[in-house]
Image (tube, rainbow, N blue to C red):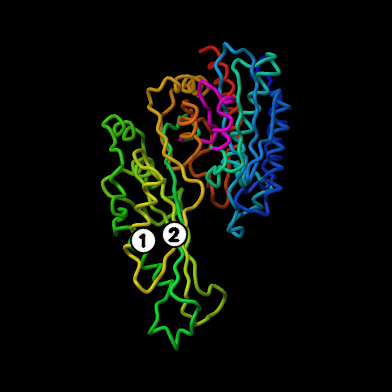
Protein backbone atom coordinates (compact mmCIF):
# COMPACT_ATOMS: atom_id res chain seq x y z
CA UNK A 1 0.00 0.00 0.00
CA UNK A 2 1.26 3.50 -0.81
CA UNK A 3 0.57 6.63 1.21
CA UNK A 4 -2.19 7.80 -1.15
CA UNK A 5 -4.18 4.61 -0.53
CA UNK A 6 -3.52 4.84 3.21
CA UNK A 7 -4.95 8.36 3.30
CA UNK A 8 -8.05 7.26 1.40
CA UNK A 9 -8.65 4.22 3.62
CA UNK A 10 -8.28 6.24 6.81
CA UNK A 11 -10.14 9.36 5.75
CA UNK A 12 -13.15 8.78 8.03
CA UNK A 13 -10.93 8.20 11.08
CA UNK A 14 -8.83 11.24 10.24
CA UNK A 15 -11.92 13.44 9.93
CA UNK A 16 -13.20 12.25 13.32
CA UNK A 17 -9.84 13.09 14.88
CA UNK A 18 -10.23 16.68 13.77
CA UNK A 19 -13.57 16.92 15.58
CA UNK A 20 -11.94 15.64 18.77
CA UNK A 21 -9.14 18.19 18.46
CA UNK A 22 -11.58 21.06 17.88
CA UNK A 23 -13.54 20.20 21.02
CA UNK A 24 -10.57 21.21 23.21
CA UNK A 25 -11.03 24.90 24.19
CA UNK A 26 -7.35 25.79 23.99
CA UNK A 27 -7.72 29.58 24.39
CA UNK A 28 -4.20 30.72 25.27
CA UNK A 29 -5.04 34.25 26.36
CA UNK A 30 -7.44 33.17 29.14
CA UNK A 31 -5.75 32.08 32.42
CA UNK A 32 -8.79 29.99 33.32
CA UNK A 33 -8.19 27.92 30.16
CA UNK A 34 -4.60 26.97 31.05
CA UNK A 35 -5.55 23.36 31.79
CA UNK A 36 -7.37 23.11 28.47
CA UNK A 37 -4.34 24.48 26.61
CA UNK A 38 -2.16 21.87 28.28
CA UNK A 39 -4.74 19.22 27.42
CA UNK A 40 -4.40 20.24 23.76
CA UNK A 41 -0.59 19.98 23.99
CA UNK A 42 -0.87 16.48 25.41
CA UNK A 43 -3.38 15.55 22.69
CA UNK A 44 -0.92 16.71 20.02
CA UNK A 45 1.94 14.78 21.62
CA UNK A 46 -0.13 11.57 21.71
CA UNK A 47 -1.17 12.09 18.10
CA UNK A 48 2.43 12.56 16.97
CA UNK A 49 3.45 9.43 18.83
CA UNK A 50 0.67 7.49 17.10
CA UNK A 51 2.01 8.81 13.77
CA UNK A 52 5.38 7.24 14.59
CA UNK A 53 7.49 10.13 15.91
CA UNK A 54 9.97 8.37 18.24
CA UNK A 55 11.09 11.24 20.47
CA UNK A 56 8.60 13.70 21.96
CA UNK A 57 8.78 16.13 24.85
CA UNK A 58 6.60 18.81 26.41
CA UNK A 59 8.80 21.83 27.09
CA UNK A 60 7.30 23.91 29.88
CA UNK A 61 7.43 27.70 29.58
CA UNK A 62 6.20 30.43 31.94
CA UNK A 63 2.77 30.05 30.36
CA UNK A 64 1.94 27.20 27.95
CA UNK A 65 4.01 24.16 26.85
CA UNK A 66 5.78 23.60 23.56
CA UNK A 67 5.52 20.18 21.91
CA UNK A 68 9.02 19.25 20.75
CA UNK A 69 9.67 16.23 18.55
CA UNK A 70 12.59 14.69 16.71
CA UNK A 71 12.75 11.94 14.10
CA UNK A 72 16.14 11.34 12.48
CA UNK A 73 15.93 8.72 9.76
CA UNK A 74 19.14 9.36 7.82
CA UNK A 75 21.59 12.17 8.50
CA UNK A 76 22.29 12.41 4.76
CA UNK A 77 18.68 13.46 4.12
CA UNK A 78 17.31 17.01 4.43
CA UNK A 79 16.14 18.08 7.88
CA UNK A 80 12.76 19.82 8.06
CA UNK A 81 11.63 21.87 11.05
CA UNK A 82 7.83 21.77 11.40
CA UNK A 83 6.03 24.66 13.05
CA UNK A 84 2.42 25.08 14.11
CA UNK A 85 0.28 26.17 17.03
CA UNK A 86 -2.49 24.36 18.88
CA UNK A 87 -3.90 27.39 20.72
CA UNK A 88 -6.89 29.38 19.51
CA UNK A 89 -8.37 32.84 19.82
CA UNK A 90 -11.05 33.76 22.40
CA UNK A 91 -14.61 33.16 21.25
CA UNK A 92 -16.26 36.37 22.45
CA UNK A 93 -18.76 37.77 21.61
CA UNK A 94 -20.34 34.38 22.22
CA UNK A 95 -23.86 35.49 21.29
CA UNK A 96 -22.77 35.98 17.65
CA UNK A 97 -21.97 32.28 17.18
CA UNK A 98 -24.66 30.31 15.37
CA UNK A 99 -23.43 27.09 17.01
CA UNK A 100 -21.26 26.52 20.10
CA UNK A 101 -17.63 27.34 19.21
CA UNK A 102 -16.20 24.15 20.71
CA UNK A 103 -18.88 21.82 19.38
CA UNK A 104 -17.82 21.29 15.73
CA UNK A 105 -20.86 21.70 13.53
CA UNK A 106 -21.26 20.92 9.82
CA UNK A 107 -23.52 23.51 8.22
CA UNK A 108 -24.02 24.16 4.50
CA UNK A 109 -20.94 22.12 3.69
CA UNK A 110 -18.63 23.98 6.08
CA UNK A 111 -17.21 22.88 9.44
CA UNK A 112 -17.76 25.55 12.10
CA UNK A 113 -15.61 25.65 15.24
CA UNK A 114 -13.06 27.89 16.88
CA UNK A 115 -9.60 26.88 15.65
CA UNK A 116 -10.89 24.98 12.61
CA UNK A 117 -9.23 27.34 10.14
CA UNK A 118 -6.57 28.81 12.42
CA UNK A 119 -4.99 26.29 12.56
CA UNK A 120 -6.01 22.90 13.93
CA UNK A 121 -7.08 21.47 10.57
CA UNK A 122 -3.75 22.45 9.02
CA UNK A 123 -1.73 21.01 11.91
CA UNK A 124 -3.62 17.74 12.06
CA UNK A 125 -3.56 17.07 8.30
CA UNK A 126 0.21 17.53 8.42
CA UNK A 127 0.51 14.96 11.21
CA UNK A 128 -1.78 12.58 9.31
CA UNK A 129 0.39 12.93 6.20
CA UNK A 130 3.44 11.99 8.28
CA UNK A 131 1.61 8.91 9.55
CA UNK A 132 0.58 7.84 6.05
CA UNK A 133 4.14 7.92 4.78
CA UNK A 134 5.62 6.29 7.88
CA UNK A 135 3.09 3.45 8.04
CA UNK A 136 3.43 2.56 4.37
CA UNK A 137 7.18 2.93 3.86
CA UNK A 138 8.54 2.25 7.33
CA UNK A 139 10.42 5.53 7.51
CA UNK A 140 10.24 9.16 6.40
CA UNK A 141 12.00 10.61 3.36
CA UNK A 142 13.33 13.47 5.52
CA UNK A 143 14.51 14.07 9.06
CA UNK A 144 11.97 15.91 11.20
CA UNK A 145 12.20 18.43 14.00
CA UNK A 146 8.88 19.58 15.46
CA UNK A 147 7.91 22.72 17.39
CA UNK A 148 4.18 23.06 18.04
CA UNK A 149 3.41 25.87 20.45
CA UNK A 150 0.43 27.01 22.51
CA UNK A 151 1.03 30.76 22.50
CA UNK A 152 0.93 31.95 18.88
CA UNK A 153 -2.38 33.72 19.43
CA UNK A 154 -0.78 35.85 22.15
CA UNK A 155 2.32 36.68 20.10
CA UNK A 156 4.59 33.70 20.91
CA UNK A 157 6.18 35.40 23.94
CA UNK A 158 8.10 32.31 25.12
CA UNK A 159 8.95 30.36 21.97
CA UNK A 160 11.92 32.55 20.92
CA UNK A 161 13.65 31.72 24.21
CA UNK A 162 13.03 28.01 23.60
CA UNK A 163 14.56 28.32 20.13
CA UNK A 164 17.63 30.09 21.51
CA UNK A 165 18.06 27.56 24.33
CA UNK A 166 17.73 24.62 21.94
CA UNK A 167 19.57 26.07 18.98
CA UNK A 168 21.93 23.08 18.78
CA UNK A 169 18.99 20.66 18.66
CA UNK A 170 17.17 22.63 15.97
CA UNK A 171 19.68 22.54 13.14
CA UNK A 172 17.62 22.21 9.98
CA UNK A 173 17.72 23.01 6.29
CA UNK A 174 14.31 24.67 6.09
CA UNK A 175 11.23 25.27 8.23
CA UNK A 176 7.66 24.48 7.22
CA UNK A 177 4.88 26.50 8.84
CA UNK A 178 1.39 25.09 8.44
CA UNK A 179 -0.09 28.38 9.68
CA UNK A 180 -1.29 29.59 6.31
CA UNK A 181 -3.99 29.47 3.68
CA UNK A 182 -4.95 29.40 0.02
CA UNK A 183 -6.30 32.19 -2.17
CA UNK A 184 -9.23 29.99 -3.16
CA UNK A 185 -10.52 26.43 -3.31
CA UNK A 186 -9.00 25.99 -6.77
CA UNK A 187 -6.23 28.56 -6.37
CA UNK A 188 -3.14 27.07 -4.73
CA UNK A 189 -0.83 29.65 -3.23
CA UNK A 190 2.31 30.08 -1.17
CA UNK A 191 2.59 32.90 1.33
CA UNK A 192 5.97 34.64 1.08
CA UNK A 193 5.33 37.68 3.27
CA UNK A 194 3.98 38.23 6.78
CA UNK A 195 3.58 41.49 8.66
CA UNK A 196 5.28 42.22 11.96
CA UNK A 197 3.44 43.28 15.10
CA UNK A 198 3.67 45.59 18.06
CA UNK A 199 1.07 47.06 20.36
CA UNK A 200 0.32 48.81 23.61
CA UNK A 201 -2.36 49.68 26.10
CA UNK A 202 -3.05 53.36 26.73
CA UNK A 203 -4.32 54.32 30.20
CA UNK A 204 -5.65 57.86 30.66
CA UNK A 205 -6.20 59.42 34.08
CA UNK A 206 -7.63 62.89 34.71
CA UNK A 207 -8.35 62.64 38.44
CA UNK A 208 -8.72 60.37 41.45
CA UNK A 209 -12.44 59.60 41.20
CA UNK A 210 -15.43 59.74 38.87
CA UNK A 211 -17.51 62.85 39.47
CA UNK A 212 -21.13 64.01 39.24
CA UNK A 213 -21.50 65.26 35.67
CA UNK A 214 -23.90 68.00 36.72
CA UNK A 215 -21.70 69.40 39.47
CA UNK A 216 -18.36 68.99 37.69
CA UNK A 217 -18.91 68.21 34.00
CA UNK A 218 -18.53 71.77 32.78
CA UNK A 219 -15.42 72.45 34.82
CA UNK A 220 -13.21 69.31 34.87
CA UNK A 221 -11.70 67.11 32.15
CA UNK A 222 -13.38 63.88 31.07
CA UNK A 223 -10.96 60.94 30.64
CA UNK A 224 -13.08 59.23 27.98
CA UNK A 225 -13.23 62.43 25.96
CA UNK A 226 -9.45 62.87 26.29
CA UNK A 227 -8.87 59.34 25.00
CA UNK A 228 -11.25 59.76 22.08
CA UNK A 229 -9.59 63.01 21.05
CA UNK A 230 -6.17 61.37 21.39
CA UNK A 231 -7.30 58.42 19.27
CA UNK A 232 -8.46 60.79 16.54
CA UNK A 233 -4.92 62.15 16.14
CA UNK A 234 -3.49 58.82 14.90
CA UNK A 235 -4.98 58.99 11.39
CA UNK A 236 -5.75 61.56 8.76
CA UNK A 237 -9.29 61.48 7.35
CA UNK A 238 -8.09 59.52 4.28
CA UNK A 239 -6.71 56.68 6.41
CA UNK A 240 -3.04 57.67 6.34
CA UNK A 241 -1.28 57.16 9.67
CA UNK A 242 -0.48 60.59 11.16
CA UNK A 243 2.21 59.45 13.60
CA UNK A 244 5.35 61.42 12.77
CA UNK A 245 8.06 59.20 11.25
CA UNK A 246 5.77 56.17 10.97
CA UNK A 247 6.51 55.58 7.27
CA UNK A 248 10.17 56.65 7.31
CA UNK A 249 11.60 53.11 7.48
CA UNK A 250 9.11 51.41 5.15
CA UNK A 251 10.93 49.76 2.25
CA UNK A 252 9.29 50.77 -1.06
CA UNK A 253 7.97 48.04 -3.32
CA UNK A 254 10.12 47.11 -6.28
CA UNK A 255 8.67 47.12 -9.79
CA UNK A 256 8.77 43.32 -9.71
CA UNK A 257 6.79 43.22 -6.46
CA UNK A 258 4.24 45.72 -7.74
CA UNK A 259 3.79 43.74 -10.94
CA UNK A 260 3.41 40.45 -9.08
CA UNK A 261 0.71 41.87 -6.82
CA UNK A 262 -1.09 43.62 -9.69
CA UNK A 263 -1.27 40.33 -11.60
CA UNK A 264 -3.49 38.78 -8.92
CA UNK A 265 -7.19 39.36 -9.71
CA UNK A 266 -9.18 41.12 -6.99
CA UNK A 267 -12.93 41.33 -6.56
CA UNK A 268 -13.32 44.38 -4.33
CA UNK A 269 -17.08 43.95 -4.10
CA UNK A 270 -16.65 40.32 -3.09
CA UNK A 271 -14.03 41.29 -0.53
CA UNK A 272 -16.38 43.89 0.96
CA UNK A 273 -19.19 41.34 1.12
CA UNK A 274 -16.89 38.73 2.68
CA UNK A 275 -15.82 41.21 5.35
CA UNK A 276 -19.41 42.27 6.01
CA UNK A 277 -18.53 45.98 5.94
CA UNK A 278 -20.39 48.97 4.51
CA UNK A 279 -17.44 50.17 2.46
CA UNK A 280 -13.70 49.94 1.90
CA UNK A 281 -11.26 52.42 3.45
CA UNK A 282 -7.55 52.95 3.72
CA UNK A 283 -4.39 54.75 2.71
CA UNK A 284 -4.78 56.33 -0.76
CA UNK A 285 -2.40 55.62 -3.62
CA UNK A 286 -2.28 51.86 -3.08
CA UNK A 287 -4.39 49.00 -4.37
CA UNK A 288 -6.46 46.85 -2.02
CA UNK A 289 -3.88 44.06 -2.02
CA UNK A 290 -1.00 46.49 -1.57
CA UNK A 291 -2.70 47.96 1.49
CA UNK A 292 -3.49 44.55 2.93
CA UNK A 293 -0.09 42.98 2.29
CA UNK A 294 2.52 45.73 2.12
CA UNK A 295 1.41 48.81 4.04
CA UNK A 296 1.75 49.23 7.83
CA UNK A 297 -1.25 49.94 10.03
CA UNK A 298 -2.31 51.40 13.36
CA UNK A 299 -5.49 49.79 14.67
CA UNK A 300 -7.53 50.58 17.75
CA UNK A 301 -8.63 47.18 19.04
CA UNK A 302 -10.70 48.44 21.95
CA UNK A 303 -11.61 51.56 23.94
CA UNK A 304 -13.36 51.54 27.30
CA UNK A 305 -14.02 53.75 30.31
CA UNK A 306 -16.79 55.20 32.44
CA UNK A 307 -20.17 53.59 33.01
CA UNK A 308 -21.14 50.79 30.62
CA UNK A 309 -24.10 49.18 32.36
CA UNK A 310 -27.76 49.44 31.42
CA UNK A 311 -29.53 52.76 31.73
CA UNK A 312 -27.90 56.05 32.66
CA UNK A 313 -25.29 56.99 35.22
CA UNK A 314 -24.42 60.66 35.01
CA UNK A 315 -20.71 60.64 35.81
CA UNK A 316 -17.63 62.32 34.44
CA UNK A 317 -15.08 59.46 34.25
CA UNK A 318 -11.58 59.92 35.60
CA UNK A 319 -10.09 56.93 33.73
CA UNK A 320 -10.22 55.57 30.20
CA UNK A 321 -8.29 52.87 28.38
CA UNK A 322 -7.49 51.76 24.85
CA UNK A 323 -5.53 49.01 23.09
CA UNK A 324 -3.57 49.62 19.89
CA UNK A 325 -1.80 47.15 17.63
CA UNK A 326 0.35 47.96 14.62
CA UNK A 327 1.03 45.64 11.69
CA UNK A 328 4.53 46.25 10.39
CA UNK A 329 6.20 45.78 7.02
CA UNK A 330 9.82 45.26 5.88
CA UNK A 331 12.08 48.04 7.12
CA UNK A 332 10.11 48.63 10.31
CA UNK A 333 10.90 47.19 13.74
CA UNK A 334 8.62 46.85 16.78
CA UNK A 335 11.05 48.83 18.95
CA UNK A 336 11.23 51.82 16.62
CA UNK A 337 7.47 51.95 16.01
CA UNK A 338 6.72 51.73 19.74
CA UNK A 339 9.08 54.66 20.32
CA UNK A 340 7.18 56.67 17.68
CA UNK A 341 3.83 55.82 19.28
CA UNK A 342 5.01 56.96 22.70
CA UNK A 343 6.30 60.24 21.27
CA UNK A 344 3.02 60.83 19.46
CA UNK A 345 0.97 60.16 22.58
CA UNK A 346 3.16 62.44 24.68
CA UNK A 347 2.88 65.21 22.08
CA UNK A 348 -0.92 65.03 21.98
CA UNK A 349 -1.71 64.55 25.66
CA UNK A 350 -3.26 67.68 27.22
CA UNK A 351 -1.66 69.10 30.38
CA UNK A 352 -4.66 68.15 32.54
CA UNK A 353 -4.29 64.42 31.81
CA UNK A 354 -1.75 61.70 32.59
CA UNK A 355 -1.26 58.93 30.03
CA UNK A 356 0.59 55.66 30.63
CA UNK A 357 1.73 53.53 27.69
CA UNK A 358 2.18 49.84 28.49
CA UNK A 359 3.65 47.80 25.58
CA UNK A 360 1.86 44.51 24.96
CA UNK A 361 3.82 41.28 25.02
CA UNK A 362 4.40 39.35 21.82
CA UNK A 363 5.91 41.78 19.32
CA UNK A 364 7.27 40.43 16.02
CA UNK A 365 9.39 41.53 13.09
CA UNK A 366 7.96 41.34 9.55
CA UNK A 367 9.02 38.42 7.37
CA UNK A 368 9.57 38.38 3.62
CA UNK A 369 10.87 35.58 1.42
CA UNK A 370 12.00 36.26 -2.14
CA UNK A 371 9.83 34.44 -4.66
CA UNK A 372 13.00 33.10 -6.29
CA UNK A 373 14.17 31.48 -3.04
CA UNK A 374 15.13 27.83 -3.71
CA UNK A 375 13.22 26.62 -0.64
CA UNK A 376 9.94 27.52 -2.35
CA UNK A 377 10.52 25.29 -5.37
CA UNK A 378 9.64 21.99 -3.67
CA UNK A 379 6.47 23.38 -2.09
CA UNK A 380 5.42 24.91 -5.42
CA UNK A 381 5.98 21.56 -7.16
CA UNK A 382 3.89 19.74 -4.54
CA UNK A 383 0.98 22.15 -4.97
CA UNK A 384 1.21 21.97 -8.76
CA UNK A 385 1.15 18.16 -8.69
CA UNK A 386 -1.96 17.97 -6.49
CA UNK A 387 -3.91 20.88 -7.99
CA UNK A 388 -2.78 20.56 -11.60
CA UNK A 389 -1.44 24.09 -12.01
CA UNK A 390 1.22 26.38 -10.61
CA UNK A 391 0.56 28.21 -7.33
CA UNK A 392 0.50 31.95 -6.82
CA UNK A 393 2.93 33.70 -4.53
CA UNK A 394 0.98 35.85 -2.09
CA UNK A 395 1.46 37.74 1.16
CA UNK A 396 -0.58 38.02 4.31
CA UNK A 397 -1.59 40.91 6.51
CA UNK A 398 -1.31 38.57 9.48
CA UNK A 399 1.65 37.77 11.68
CA UNK A 400 3.45 34.54 12.55
CA UNK A 401 6.12 35.79 14.97
CA UNK A 402 8.39 32.77 14.87
CA UNK A 403 9.26 32.96 11.16
CA UNK A 404 11.71 35.82 11.59
CA UNK A 405 13.04 34.19 14.79
CA UNK A 406 13.92 31.06 12.81
CA UNK A 407 15.80 33.23 10.32
CA UNK A 408 17.69 35.17 13.00
CA UNK A 409 18.44 32.34 15.43
CA UNK A 410 18.73 29.30 13.13
CA UNK A 411 19.64 30.88 9.80
CA UNK A 412 16.83 29.12 7.92
CA UNK A 413 13.91 30.31 5.83
CA UNK A 414 10.31 29.27 6.38
CA UNK A 415 7.90 27.93 3.77
CA UNK A 416 4.29 28.68 4.72
CA UNK A 417 1.87 26.04 3.49
CA UNK A 418 -1.71 25.88 4.76
CA UNK A 419 -5.29 25.46 3.63
CA UNK A 420 -7.44 28.09 5.32
CA UNK A 421 -9.63 29.94 2.83
CA UNK A 422 -10.54 33.63 2.48
CA UNK A 423 -13.57 34.57 4.53
CA UNK A 424 -13.12 31.71 7.00
CA UNK A 425 -13.54 34.16 9.89
CA UNK A 426 -10.30 33.52 11.69
CA UNK A 427 -10.39 35.34 15.06
CA UNK A 428 -14.10 36.09 14.57
CA UNK A 429 -17.39 34.37 15.48
CA UNK A 430 -18.41 31.44 13.27
CA UNK A 431 -14.91 30.44 12.18
CA UNK A 432 -15.03 27.66 9.58
CA UNK A 433 -12.97 25.27 7.48
CA UNK A 434 -14.04 23.63 4.23
CA UNK A 435 -13.85 19.88 5.04
CA UNK A 436 -13.75 18.96 1.35
CA UNK A 437 -10.26 20.48 1.44
CA UNK A 438 -8.96 17.96 3.99
CA UNK A 439 -7.94 15.20 1.52
CA UNK A 440 -6.07 17.74 -0.63
CA UNK A 441 -4.29 19.14 2.43
CA UNK A 442 -3.06 15.69 3.46
CA UNK A 443 -1.95 14.89 -0.09
CA UNK A 444 -0.05 18.16 -0.50
CA UNK A 445 1.81 17.69 2.78
CA UNK A 446 2.69 14.09 1.92
CA UNK A 447 3.80 15.10 -1.58
CA UNK A 448 5.92 17.90 -0.16
CA UNK A 449 7.69 15.59 2.29
CA UNK A 450 8.31 13.05 -0.46
CA UNK A 451 9.68 15.61 -2.91
CA UNK A 452 11.83 17.28 -0.27
CA UNK A 453 13.44 13.95 0.53
CA UNK A 454 14.58 13.52 -3.06
CA UNK A 455 15.51 17.16 -3.71
Residue 50, picture quadrant: top right
Any part of residue 335 in sight: yes
Residue visible at 57% across and 11% down?
76
Residue range of the region highlighted in magenta in the rendering: 161-183
For this orientation, the residue located farthest to the bottom is 215
Q: Position of residue 386 (x, y in %)?
A: 53, 22
Label 1, label 2: how many angstroms apart (C-alpha)? Answer: 8 Å
- In the picture of the structure, the residue carrying the numbered disc 1 is 345
The foreground one among 376 and 446 is 376
Helix, strand or loop for disc 1: helix
Rendering coords of residue 286 (x, y %): 29, 44
Report the disc number at residue 367: none
Instruction: Report whether 246 appears left or right of 326.
Output: left
Q: Is residue 416 magenta?
A: no
Q: Circle 2 sits on which residue?
A: 357
User: Mark 2 falls on what kind of element?
Assistant: strand
Q: Is residue 433 left or right of residue 389?
A: right
Question: Is 175 included in the stretch rendered in magenta?
Answer: yes
Quarter holding residue 216: bottom left
Residue drawn where x is 50% and y is 73% of the image:
306
Crowding at dot 1, Cα within 10 Å, few <14 / some 14-19 / many 20+, comes out as some
Identify whether 208 is placed above or below 234. below
Check if mark 1's residue and mark 2's residue have beta carbons within 8 Å: yes
**In the depicted view, which residue is nearer to us: 261 or 208?**
208
Lateral position of residue 249 relative to residue 174, left or right = left
Amino acid sequence: MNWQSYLEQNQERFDEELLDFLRIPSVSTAPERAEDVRKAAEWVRRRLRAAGVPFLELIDTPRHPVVFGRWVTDERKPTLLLYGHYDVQPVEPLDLWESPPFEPTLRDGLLYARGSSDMKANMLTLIQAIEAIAKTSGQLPVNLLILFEGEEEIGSPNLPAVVRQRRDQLKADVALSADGGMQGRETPSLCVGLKGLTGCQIDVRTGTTDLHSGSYGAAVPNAVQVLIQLAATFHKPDGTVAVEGFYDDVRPLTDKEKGSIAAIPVDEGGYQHEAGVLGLWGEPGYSLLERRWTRPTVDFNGIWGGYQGQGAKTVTPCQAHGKITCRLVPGQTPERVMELLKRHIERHTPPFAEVTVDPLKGSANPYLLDTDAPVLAVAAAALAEVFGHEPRFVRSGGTVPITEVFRQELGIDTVTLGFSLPGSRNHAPNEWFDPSFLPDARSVFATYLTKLGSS
